[in-house]
Image (cartoon, rainbow, N blue to C red):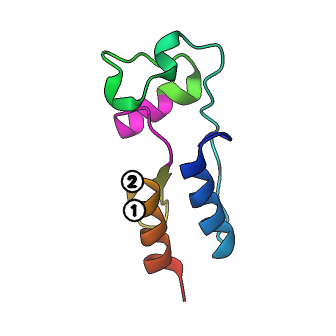
C-alpha cells in the first residue's frame, strides 16, 4: 500500500470493517525517477527504487497497489475490488 492510493484505502477500510489484523508495507515513491509516476501499464523495464517496492515487484510481478497476501490461505492478489470481495467471502459473516 501507500498512503495516497485511494484503492489501497478501500482495502484498509475493509480490513478494519472485518476487524482483521494486518501488516502494512508502505511502498511509497520516495525520491524515485520520473517513471515512478507513470501508471503500471506505461512502465517499460521498470526498476523499483526502494527496498519495499523491489520486494513487491519480486513477489507479485508488478508495481501496483493494493497487493494482498493472505498468510492463512497462501492466496495473493491485486485489484481493490477483487481483494475486498475475497476478504468479505473468506472472513465476513
| Residue lying at 65% horizontally and 52% vertically, measured from the top left | 23
Residue 79: percent from left, percent from top: 41, 52
Q: Can I make out residue 19 in this image?
A: no
**In the image, residue 32 above or below residue 54:** above
**In the image, residue 41 above or below residue 88:** above
Return the residue nearer the eye: 68 or 65: 65
Which residue sits furthest top?
33
Q: Horizontal placement of 8 versus 54: left or right?
A: right
Badge 1 crowding class, 10 Å Cα cut-off, few under 14, some 14 to 19, many 20 or more, is few
| Residue lying at 63% horizontally and 53% vertically, measured from the top left | 9
Residue assigned mark 2: 77
For the residues carrying marks 1 and 2, which lies nearer the camera in this image?
Answer: 1
Residue 82's disc is 1
Asked which secondary structure carries label 2, the reply is strand
Residue 89: percent from left, percent from top: 43, 79
Q: Distance between the residues labelled 1 and 2?
A: 8 Å
* Residue 2 counted in the magenta span: no
**In the image, residue 11 above or below residue 45:** below
How many numbered discs sit on the rendered protein? 2
| Residue lying at 38% horizontally and 60% vertically, measured from the top left | 75
Q: Tell me the magenta residue range.
A: 55-66
Image quadrant where residue 31 sits: top right
Q: Quadrant of the N terminus?
A: top right
User: Decide: marks 1, 2 in contact (CB < 8 A)?
Assistant: yes
Amino acid at each position: 500500500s501507500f498512503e495516497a492510493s485511494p484503492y489501497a484505502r478501500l482495502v484498509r477500510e475493509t480490513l478494519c470493517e472485518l476487524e482483521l489484523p494486518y501488516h502494512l508495507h508502505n511502498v511509497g515513491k520516495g525520491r524515485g525517477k520520473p517513471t515512478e509516476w507513470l501508471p503500471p501499464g506505461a512502465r517499460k523495464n521498470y526498476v523499483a527504487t526502494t527496498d519495499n517496492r523491489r520486494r513487491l515487484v519480486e513477489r507479485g510481478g508488478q508495481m501496483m497497489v493494493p497487493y494482498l497476501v493472505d498468510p492463512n490461505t497462501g492466496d495473493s492478489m491485486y485489484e481493490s475490488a477483487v481483494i475486498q470481495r475475497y476478504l468479505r467471502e473468506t472472513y465476513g459473516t
